[in-house]
Image (cartoon, rainbow, N blue to C red):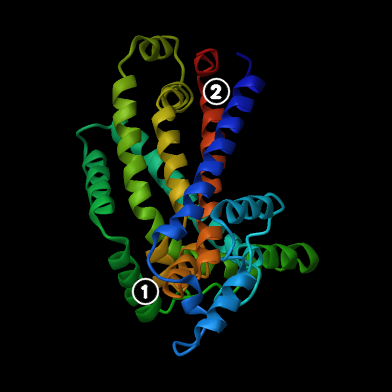
């Protein structure tokens, strides 16, 4: 099987998964108790008003008609109108998606930059102080709740030291990049990065600890194999042997976790976004649930599901690059 055929097969499977998500999300609304129109009318509204609203929203149509209309609307990118604030759901999601992607990517970068070198060094210097330190750090990162870590960072780093912004997203990446290109202003890029530091550390600490442990254990399995001894016998530098040959053979489980975790992060780090008042998808989803805004809930979950699918296809493509036997199978 060629790479193009392999990728086309994965894309087709992804489309089927997204269709499954859409179907489940659509029918889930009819399994939950309560009338969606209750959130839109005053409690003392008469039955005539409620019936007219149901007719306007198409809720009086048979279920298969509603399902067909929903699928055809989704096909052209129409997620419907928000029941709570009477705006297009697609525009509400698009307004919040960049904030979530920025936070997820920043957390992933923090995790990769710290975890992979730390895992490699920890495996190379097994049973030495640096290995014990890395193990202790991993244990701390995995066992620390991010809601506690976020609050502690706000108190000690932002409030006492007054060094970094505590809440909110004051500037988008596009704004900072435009200032850099048009005005040559690096300070705007610095402001953008500063607002990301505390949320990214909070969200990425568990992720960093997990990748560190995976890298260390994978390196320990590979580091004494015959091909590594052959590399050393040929006189290759130790750094080149470790990072080019050994690390590559340990990357598949790491990429799996990276893909799953990045999908989770894009799905909305609800707690972190709430602590730092970060205007992302996770916070939007919680607000929509509180308002019983079904169209927004459905749209957000579908976008999150599609994000998972896209990331998993990218992970599969990376598998195929790192290990061509995946394509052959």
Kindly state the secondary structure of the residue where label 2 is placed: helix
Where on the picture, by quarter, is residue 321?
top right
Mark 1 or 2, closer to the camera? 2
| Residue in view at x 37 percent, y 48 percent | 207
Residue extending furthest bottom? 44
Q: Nearer the viewer, residue 185 or 1?
A: 1
State which quarter of the image contains the N terminus: top right
Picture coordinates of residue 145, whole percent (x, y): 27, 60
Picture coordinates of residue 21, whole percent (x, y): 50, 46
The disc label shown at residue 154, or none: 1
Q: Between disc 1 and disc 2, whose residue precedes?
A: 1
Q: Residues within 10 Å of mark 1 (few under 14, many from 20)?
A: many
**Residues at circles 1 and 2 in contact by the CB criterion of under 8 Å:** no
Residue of label 2 = 320
Position of 64 with respect to 216 (left or right) is right
Looking at the picture, does residue 209 appear above or below residue 80?
Answer: above
Q: Is residue 82 visible?
A: no
């Amino acid at each position: 099987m060629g790479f193009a055929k392999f990728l086309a097969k994965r894309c087709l499977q992804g489309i089927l998964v997204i269709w499954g998500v859409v179907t489940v999300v659509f029918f889930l609304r009819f399994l939950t108790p309560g009338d969606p129109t209750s959130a839109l009318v005053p409690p003392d509204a008469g039955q005539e008003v409620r019936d007219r609203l149901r007719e306007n929203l198409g809720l009086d149509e048979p279920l298969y008609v509603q399902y067909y209309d929903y699928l055809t609307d989704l096909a052209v990118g129409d997620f419907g109108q928000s029941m709570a604030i009477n705006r297009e759901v697609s525009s509400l999601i698009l307004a919040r998606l960049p904030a979530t992607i920025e936070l997820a990517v920043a957390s992933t970068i923090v995790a990769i930059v710290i975890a992979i070198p730390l895992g490699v060094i920890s495996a190379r210097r097994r049973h030495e102080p640096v290995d014990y330190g890395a193990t202790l750090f991993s244990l701390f990162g995995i066992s620390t709740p991010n809601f506690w870590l976020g609050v502690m960072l706000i108190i000690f780093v932002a409030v006492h030291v007054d060094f970094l912004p505590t809440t909110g997203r004051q500037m988008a990446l596009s704004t900072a990049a435009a200032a850099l290109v048009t005005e040559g202003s690096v300070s705007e890029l610095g402001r953008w990065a500063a607002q990301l530091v505390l949320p990214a550390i909070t969200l990425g600490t568990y992720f960093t600890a997990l990748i560190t442990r995976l890298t260390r254990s994978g390196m320990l399995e590979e580091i004494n194999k015959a091909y590594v001894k052959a590399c050393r016998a040929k006189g290759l530098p130790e750094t080149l042997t470790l990072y080019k040959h050994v690390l590559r053979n340990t990357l598949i489980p790491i990429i799996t976790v990276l893909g799953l975790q990045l999908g989770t992060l894009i799905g909305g780090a609800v707690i972190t976004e709430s602590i730092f008042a970060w205007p992302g998808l996770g916070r939007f989803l919680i607000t929509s649930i509180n308002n019983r805004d079904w169209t927004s809930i459905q749209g957000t979950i579908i976008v999150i599901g599609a994000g998972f699918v896209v990331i998993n296809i990218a992970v599969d493509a990376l598998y195929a690059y790192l290990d061509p036997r995946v394509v052959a199978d």
